[in-house]
Image: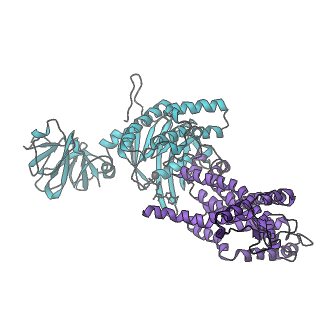
Amino acid sequence: MMRRLLIAVPYGWLLLLFLVPFLIVLKISLSDIALSIPPYTPTLDLSEGWAGIRDFFSALDFENFTFLTTDDLYWKAYLSSLQIALISTLLTLLVGFPIAYGMARAPVEWRPALMMLVILPFWTSFLIRVYAWIGILSNEGFLNQFLMWIGLVDEPLTILNTNIAVYVGIVYTYLPFMILPVYATLEKMDESLLEAAEDLGCTRNQAFWFVTVPLSRPGVIAGCFLVFIPALGEFVIPSLLGGSQTLMIGKVLWEEFFSNRDWPVASAVAIILLLILIVPIVLFQRNQQKQAEANS
Amino acid sequence: MAERPSPNQTVFAPWTDPDAVPLIRIEGVTKRFGDFTAIDNIDLNIYRREFFALLGPSGCGKTTLMRMLAGFETPTEGRISIDEQDMAGVAPNRRAVNMMFQSYALFPHLSVWENIAFGLRRDGADKDKIAARVEEMLKLVQLERFARRKPHQISGGQRQRVALARSLAKAPKLLLLDEPLGALDKKLRQDTQFELMDIQEKTGTTFVIVTHDQEEAMTVASRVAVMDNGRIMQVATPAEIYEQPNSVYVADFIGDVNLIEGRVSSIDEGRATLDWAEGQHPITGQASGSLSKGGRATFAVRPEKLYISREEPTERTNRVWGKILDIGYLGNLSTYHVETTGGQVIKCEMINVSRIDRRDYTWDDEVWLSWSDTAGLVLPE
Ligand SMILES: Nc1ncnc2c1ncn2[C@@H]1O[C@H](COP(=O)(O)OP(=O)(O)O)[C@@H](O)[C@H]1O
Ligand SMILES: [Mg+2]
């Protein structure tokens, strides 16, 4: 009895906070836009009994999804989001791996402090941190002032409102999600494995490539998914740092919802995004499970 | 054990041959970590095809000495040469030395096969050669059936054998084994000891094994170095270490021993006599080290060298009387703990020739313990 109750809690949680909202969004995506509150039809009217339910279901259709295929804005936005998410994930890995590696090799007594430094940014508002980047990257920003001061450039570089600024923002924001899992795998790696590799004829460099890198793979994969998945639907960073040519599906979704007030199309966009995300999420789960098995 | 004579071959004992060239020369080596001295001025020669054991309590510096041979630590002072080549500044990957790690250090992402092939691949040997060598090694350690498994899919004993095969694959001049059997249970340990000896003989590799288990050292080694606090106390064959320990420390560390303290009353033709208690006969044993008449010394004798009797054995040189405090029955033998003058307890081991119901002695019996004058050693303090 107690056990069932304990199991029921997380399931209830998921049901309430994931499945129910999903069904609502799914329902809206199958509805039609309407000038009313809420801005779509049909709505379920239980006072008419069975007939009401039948009418409700017969009014649902896939119109909005077909609409998404007719306007190339949408699939271009999906593709561009995929591209931006992929590139930023790679960049985050390039920046995050050396940091995680350095942390894992630092003296044990430093590690908690280094870990704090990685997590520290989470303690201030995400929005404020993204705004801060505007101050750094704009034409009169700190970066350009600094570059001109040391004489590297004569006139300010245009970074803000380009995809570069979006990459900077995503890498900066999601870096801890890369560092922490990579660090976790590197930190528990047995030091003697590297010595064994050297003993068997590897140079330090080879030992890194043949032992450290493959052993950090589960952490790297986890980190990549943890960056890629939220980056794909990212909205705040492209709209604050990106320019008019920055096309990301999160931005499109926002505009459908708030500018066009077309909830059904916005919901359809969200459903497709979710379907796209299921692939990496399932792969991520598989990776985690494999890692758990290998550790047991 | 020490000597493994075969019919048409002399006893293997290169350390007795002044012309023999040692494979490893350790000369005046000291290793300090900060102001802590882990290895204290060690001199040691190890010869080709030897199975050499470093024996000592935990923390005495065995691993440190071994890591200096492998190249993971550099001596603070002194010099190590392997095969007449000075090892100073030679990186671990450039030494013809392989090490079997205490933790085995198997690569978890590689299969058994790939683990064994790892070192061979780094040497850039061609594929067929590598495959042939790996198969040979798998056969040597009887793991052919497990070649495709990952390390976490095999048992502890099998992992230990993979580690051994991997470290032997490159046919090193010297194989270092750091507590190789430490993680195995007792039965498997004993079987593996004999397997190790077998493999050592088959491959002709020089083995240096680290252990804190004296039985293990005695079983496998041609010579044993007993270490304490970064120093080597004695280097000798297992039989010599057991029968001729050069100090109380070594005598006490190896096997069971009775230690009786006293004052040297006479030294004569390699025999020393010790007065040790009022009302007891003096004890005579083989003199060892620098003893001085009138100085304090310790007599050491193994329990199995003692004989227990009810009557005073007047014909024996050494005899001590006392009362039985305790009897330990071990099946094949019985251990008698006999309390003598001044609370000194002496252990005596007797083989149980007769069945237990005809056992002659019981608790609180007054008995005599006796032994010959060559049975024990008189060691300086
Ligand atoms: N890298 C190191 N830094 C400081 N002290 C060390 C280091 N390696 C070993 N020691 C010390 O040296 C002593 C000998 O260690 P070790 O050779 O591992 O002993 P054993 O293998 O005989 O148990 C121990 O007291 C240990 O704490
Ligand atoms: Mg050790």
Quadrant where the C terminus of chain B sits is: bottom left
Residue A124, placed above or below residue B21: below
- Give the image location of residue A272, x and y in percent: 75, 58
- Residue B197 picture quarter: top left
Q: Nearer the viewer, residue B65 or B234?
A: B65
Give the colour in which the image draws chain A: purple
- Residue B171 picture quarter: top right
- Give the image location of residue A246, x and y in percent: 85, 65
Residue B64, placed above or below residue A241: above
- Give the image location of residue A154, x and y in percent: 92, 72
Q: Nearer the viewer, residue B37 or A87?
A: A87
Residue A26 visible in rendering = no
Q: Is residue A277 left or right of residue B118?
A: right
Residue at far right of view: A154
Give the colour in which the image draws chain B: cyan
Q: Nearer the viewer, residue B74 or A57?
A: A57
- Give the image location of residue B230, x and y in percent: 44, 55
Residue B64, placed above or below residue A19: above
Q: Is residue A24 left or right of residue B142?
A: right
